Amino acid sequence: MIDRTIEFRKDFVFGSATAAHQVEGDNRFNDWWAHEHAEETNAAEPSGIACDHYHRFADDFALFQSLGHQAHRMSIEWSRIEPREGDVQAAEIEHYRVVLEKLHELGIVPWVTIHHFTLPQWFAQRGGFSEKKNLDAFRRFADLAGKHFGDLCRHWCTINEPTIHAEMGFRFGYFPPRLRDDSLSAQTLENLFRAHSQVSEAIRSHVPGAEIGITLAMAAIEAFDPESDADRKMVEQRDAETNAASCDALRTGVFRYPGRPDQEIPGLAKSSTFVGVQYYSRTRYDASKGGFAMPDFNRTITQMGWEIYPEGLAPVLRQAAGTGLPVYVTENGVAHDDDRVRVEYIADHLAMVDRVRQEGADLRGYFYWSAMDNFEWNFGYGPKFGIIEVDRTTLQRKPRPSAHFFAEIARSGKLTPGLVKKYTENV
């Protein structure tokens, strides 16, 4: 529980985030749809209609506005716009223009993510980002996005969580294409940073002065036993493969990864005007168990099986600030059936943001994940991240108390102990 009043500067951005496949519904032409319906899938259930946000976006945005959201981070679905290579759907381009126009009409600043995990099936079948030769196709899509949406969007996120896409898809076999190849995973990660650099250039050709960044999944990486040399060595290795690999690449323009030669990526060092941090919890490493340690069950455990660990946000924000770029928290949220936990989660993590800001880091905004309950990838519809509840039978939206708590912070720019108490003791 916070013990003091926190005031955010007037231009600090408060918003929420969604991703196309997780909320739109019926994205039938991407690799995740194929994955969900594969005979040997590890997905809990198919995405189906999701939240039907594709048709209900106007009402959803009006609800976001009523809840004080100043900005909204969303993604455009490549597989809708180009379901077959070269077969660009004018109607889908127009759809996303209407979506962005609606945000402007409501006074909500759009932040567009170009790649949020999903790929057109034709692109995935070629190896996706694991093949350097495939990057030209993604750059063409980004060029198309800049051309058709650039007048409606100034803030762009190129790649969502490159380490997750690379490792979960190509190293740990959890996301499509479900491969287990360490080398291919590292190559994919390198190619994602190449893609970020290329896409940034493509967007700027249409949107001079665009704000462009990449959003990084940054867990707090810790030793299970801080006194164990073996555990500390595992932490160093995992940091070098994830957080450090990403931040160092943005800072220096050189992609460094354990066991691989350094690769200078043209334009990377000047590709970004900000970096996004996406933080949920910590990961501890136990060498005696060969890797991941179990969460600390003395802490609150979320529906994702993660422990709530707000103090881990501070070190990753410092690491991201070390890139020399302004930092936004582009995702932070909790899946839990007790909304009081969500209120405290938001408060405690915003307190960490303020702590690092007071140290001198250039922290400019916070986007809660997620605006509403949605399709949580392989977990399906079980985890409830939303500050807005979505009834799975009727798809009716209902703001939780945490949504009104967040609205009060966004409107006032203040977080007080009394506000937290109001939404945790009187719910």
Image (cartoon, grey):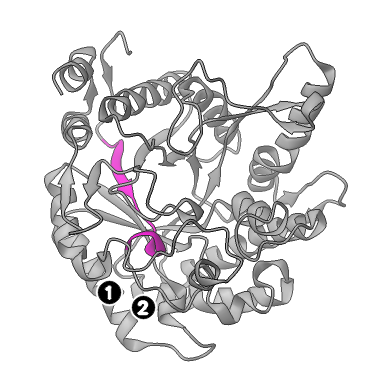
- Tell which residue pokes out farthest to the bottom in this image: 87
> For residue 112, what is the image quadrant?
bottom left
Helix, strand or loop at label 1? It is: helix
Which quarter of the figure is the C terminus placed in? top left
Q: Can residue 372 be spotted in the picture?
A: yes
Image location of residue 392, percent across then percent down: 25, 55
Mark 2 element type: helix
- C-alpha gap between disc 1 and disc 2: 8 Å
Q: In which quadrant will I find the N terminus?
A: top left
Please give the range of residues in magenta: 11-23
Whole-percent x and y of residue 403?
Answer: 20, 37
Q: Amino acid at mark 2?
A: His
| 14 in the magenta segment | yes
Q: Does 351 lie within the magenta span?
A: no
Note whether 59 is above or below 340 in the view shown: below
Q: Amino acid at mark 1?
A: Arg
Mark 1: few, some, or many residues within 10 Å (few <14, many ≥20)? some
Residue 148 bears which disc, if any? 2
- The percent coordinates of residue 116 (x first, y second) are 48, 60
Q: Is residue 259 left or right of residue 138?
A: right
The answer to whether 261 appears left or right of 408 in the picture is right
Disc 1: which residue: 97
Q: Is residue 357 left or right of residue 246?
A: left
